[in-house]
Amino acid sequence: MARLIRTEKEVEGNYTEQWIVVDEDPVAQWPSGPLEIVGRPLARVDGAERARGEAVYTADLQLPGMLHVAVLRSPHAHARVTQLDLARASEAPGVRAVLTPDDLDVLTREPGYPGAAIAAVAADTYDLAAEALELADIEWEVLQPLLDPDEAVQQGSLIDEPERYDRGNVEQGFAEADVVVETEYRTQTVLHNSMETHQSVCQWEGDLLNVYTSTQYIWGVRAETAAKLGLPEDKVRVVCHYMGGGFGAKNHPGEYTFIAAELAKRTGRPVRCALTRREENLTTGNRHATIQRLKVGAKADGTLTALVGDFVMAVGWRGFKSWTAGPMKMLYHCPNVSTVEYGAKVNTGPNAAFRAPGFVEGTFGLECLLDELAAKLEIDPLELRRRNHSDSDLVDDRPYSSKNLIECYRRAEPHWEKRDEVRARSNGPWKHGIGMASQIWFGAGGPPSYAWVRVGSDGRALVVTAMQDIGTGTKTAMAQIAAEELGLPVDRVQVSIGDSARGPYAAISAGSSTTPSMGPAVRAAAHDAARQIIEIAAQRYHKEERVLSLKGGNVVSADGGSWPIEEVTGLLDDAQILGKGARGPNPTGMRVLTFGVQVAEVAVDVETGEVRVDKIVAVHDVGRVINPLGASSQVEGGVIQGLGHTFSEDRLLDPNTGAVLNQTLDAYKMPTIADVPEIVTDLIDVPDEHLTNLGSKGLGEPPIIPTSAAVANAIRDATGADVRSLPISREEMLRALAEAKEKEKTREAPTAV
Amino acid sequence: MSDLIVNGQRYALDAQVGRSLASVLREDIGLIGTKIACNEGHCGACTVLLDGVPTLSCITLVHTVGEREVTTIEGLRDHPLVESFVRADALQCGFCTPGQIVSASALVEANPHPSREEVRHAMAGNICRCGAYPKIEEAVLTWQD
Ligand code: FES
Ligand code: FES
């Protein structure tokens, strides 16, 4: 019977209450540790078609008669269009339709950032569309841009209300402190740069709109597009079979989808609106810069007594404040915490979620602060963190569903203990050191999410769900889960995803939620199908259902006897077994979070400021691991993006005009294979006993969170220099080294009495 | 009118002057395995071989190819590197992967037993935003296994 229950949904720290319907009995979790297929390494099931260049991404789709869009964008950070005439453009060769702000509300005459969309042209080829735009007759009144986030806050130019959080009494906390450290940290603006740029192809079939799009959230695009166009949701079909990366920037349809839909309607032809790399880096989002003014108080033994944070975030013209105060509120057992977060509205491109938004930035600040405190107290940084470990969540006053951070610390210890050995490697100007940082993040996933499983008479299974695989390997994880439950070899399980018209609702691939949301639904559906196979086998072979199970492709009886599954399903002829499953609720009254620690080993040339990372050890607790091979790849990818964030990535603005100076992949420096250090991955792999039928949490985001702080702390260990802003450029490194030298001098100089 | 030789097949080249090799491969011939991620020579996603030499097809004018043989990922589908990439999990979203494999194929052709440093040097022009690099390195080092 369908049961209606009220439960809590969390996406990247946002909790909402929702109703869900649960209509199957809960399935007990599998025992901990590797099973037949789950928990064992498996090469991704869709690896070959991607590697062979057969996979058709949105960027590869060619529909007959398809038109291409070029978008006229503002070259100014802040301006007003005083004149706009597309008459000549619309008569240019190959042009089929044009759009102005009068036609579509995602186009504007008052751009608030460079790259804001003003007008669009659809033509037979992209080049013809771009050439036509040159003929647009447009005049601007250029306005003064507001770029400085502190200035924006002072002027009251805010995205929304400042967010304040208080617990305990920080004044009292500082009064009790033996030591207080106060510091300012800064982080830069980082661009997502997925290899496949944002794009959609829209095509009308009568009153049905087909949207082929590169997205992290098929169902979100469907809902938002339907709402925008005033269509019933079922009149929008969203397709994304393969996508070339998102990292948080592809959670919504984006203006390009609406432009393509409108132009497709006007021309009666399929229309592609694909962003160029430069457009991508102007308009599709970013990790916003932060300024973090932090203060910590602690007793002589390291016990934290107060934490205060004032966070200013350069959100952009639109967007949201990332949860930069999150780690300060959540990571340690500190009774007195006070934070305020300001989202500065400035004339720069809107931000978007970027892999653990806010927590990457906030962890850099907090974990560097903790190490500065440890240095002052002369306490081992790892010991300081152990002493302030929290056994329950102080924000919501709830127990954790599971927490193995102490175990993460224990596993990091052998690397951490090499500190003396590593420091002793210092040679001439090259100083070596080790640093660490802890990680906390969400990753519970949640309902609703559904899957169907179909087993044919040939004993092969098809898992159907309309989710997307953004490169995380979720499709592979789903195949493993279904195969395990059905007792089938994994090559007899196929997974069909990527089309809202061919499968039930599936979760967003963001907030480290795909596997913890989808996995339990797939297992429930496979369980439903397995139950039916067992029921049929029991009748066929005159056994009791309770003695039968599915294993290794067979129906196995506990009291002897084993029959190939296809022998049972073979009875069905053309009939099929259909299983369905839904994601159950999250545990009520509990905080489901992920934890971890990273240890970084670095070398710094104190003369030139060159920094080399030799090793990153990443230990994370994300519950049960479905595919250790894919998981280690995820961890490595997160760490590598973290290293880009630490050293080289930085969207640069002209301080006067707000123009983005590094829009190309040549100018914007992302890590290459030559920049990658040794990365050691260690996952705790213990199921969260309170979380779903799997006990798995998400893994996409945790590994990027502590990397910058661990590296900065290793630099402090090696050189005594306090790095305080990202990226750690040569300038920042040399500044920190000079400051450290200065400090050293004043310490050595005898103080006048 | 000239021809274009791609993966051993001869195609009549009927493209406007100024078009890139990448766009002709993808749009006219339908060989979509060659990806375009930047379209200005900065990322390696569009790498193809011209007479065995790795070349960025997005900044190669199609009319400059002449009689040189173009090899795309479609011409390398049976190369052992494809299997070693999959086995080593050297891809995540997979968008950079065809370009990675094409670059790697030129490396192992010239140097069947590259060192780690040689792999890192030869592959540094192929950006992977997913950060599959450690596994790419492994895939290239173990391509003959
Ligand atoms: S697409 Fe050719 S180098 Fe980037
Ligand atoms: S696998 Fe995604 S960019 Fe390389």
Image (spheres, rainbow, N blue to C red):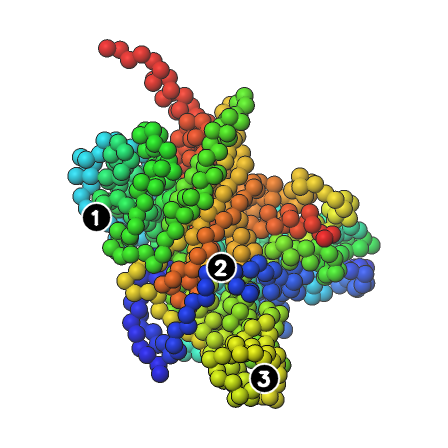
Q: Earlier in the sequence, mark 2 or mark 1?
A: 2
Label 2: which residue? A33
Q: Residue at x 67, y 41 (%)?
A: B116
Q: Earlier in the sequence, mark 3 or mark 2?
A: 2
What is the chain identity of the residue bearing mark 3?
Answer: A
**Badge 1 amino acid:** Arg
Q: Which one is nearer the viewer's eye here, A619 or A548?
A: A548
Please state the horizontal and vertical placement of residue A451, each as a whole percent of the image.
47, 74
Secondary element type, mark 1: strand
Image point (61%, 79%), residue name: A564
**Residue beneath disc 3:** A568
Q: Nearer the viewer, mark 2 or mark 1?
A: 2
Q: Please say if A224 is above or below A594.
A: below
Q: Quadrant of residue B123?
A: top right
Circle 3: residue type: Val
Marks 1 and 3 sit apart, C-alpha to C-alpha, by 61 Å
Q: Callout 2: few (<14), some (14-19), or many (20+) C-alpha neighbours within 10 Å?
A: some
| Residue to which mark 1 is pinned | A167
Per the image, label 2 sits on a secondary structure element best described as loop
